[in-house]
Amino acid sequence: MASKNTFALKSDAYAFARPRYPASLYEWLVRNVARRERAWDCATGNGQAAVDLAAHFEQVFATDVSQEQIAQQLTADNVTYSVQPAEKTTFADASFDLVTVAQALHWFDFRAFWPEVARVSRPGALFCAWGYAWFECEPDVDADVVRPFRDLIAPFWAPNNKLLWDGYQQRDIAFPMERLTTPPFAIEVRWTVPQLIAYMQTWSSYKRSQADRKAAGALSEIVDKALAAYAGKGPMQVRMPLAVVAGRVGTSASGR
């Protein structure tokens, strides 16, 4: 899928600007796995989730289809990286106690991915995918910076993103497992306006917009004005709710 290639563009900026996931999420994962021997972090990007999982599991295997993303990997002694597609890996059958997907489930071919998860998972293994889309910040920054920015990049989003925005609904992802109820999770950070802008510039739609001269010029103007107007502003609270889908491999969605 051509839209995936946007994540290879400026992979170092992506790694720098993307926030880490909340500790409460990993605590929930650990409480809900039978063993903590091997985890697979699929579509790992630069390994943000993988290195956090490494604190809880003996071995973490992290894969991504993008060599450029893997090249920006965060390191941990018990994390092994490889370039592999989500839908067809070289892992042995019944390898993993946990399979995770952070910020990427909406890009997969579900007809091939779900059978692959079933193949590489141990009986009763936990699957969990999560992602975040929009965020909450101070009203003036939202009105002056975020909303105009979002309006300009709106035409450049790939259709896949709507699956995440809608919360990974069953109609969209054909999740084959019985869904587990999860607590509400959210990323909470304190960012300056330049940090917030750097994060928005990692969005795939922003990267696509740069090929459109008119959109790129308008976005540059918004950024320049924001950096000038909020030059003296300190960090502010930014909150990003997570959409989560989780289940145990071997259970059936029809068994609810």
Image (tube, helix red, strand yellow):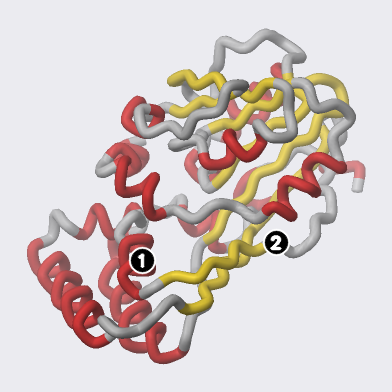
Q: Quadrant of residue 70?
A: top left
Residue 174: where, in percent of width, then height?
67, 43
Residue 118 appears in the figure:
no
Say which mark, if any, is on residue 185: 2
Taking the view exactly as shown, the residue that stands out farthest to the bottom is 140
Residue 98: where, in percent of width, then height?
74, 30
> Above or below — where is 36 with respect to 106?
above
**Within 10 angstroms of label 2, few (less than 14), some, or many (20 or more) residues?**
some
What residue lies at 51% left-to-right and 43% top-to-bottom? 104
Residue 101: where, in percent of width, then height?
60, 39
Say which mark, if any, is on residue 195: 1
Lateral position of residue 186 relative to residue 163, left or right: right
Q: Quadrant of residue 221?
A: bottom left
> Which amino acid type is marked by label 1?
Gln
Circle nearer the N terminus (2, 1): 2
Residue 49 appears in the figure:
yes
What residue lies at 35% left-to-right and 25% top-to-bottom? 67
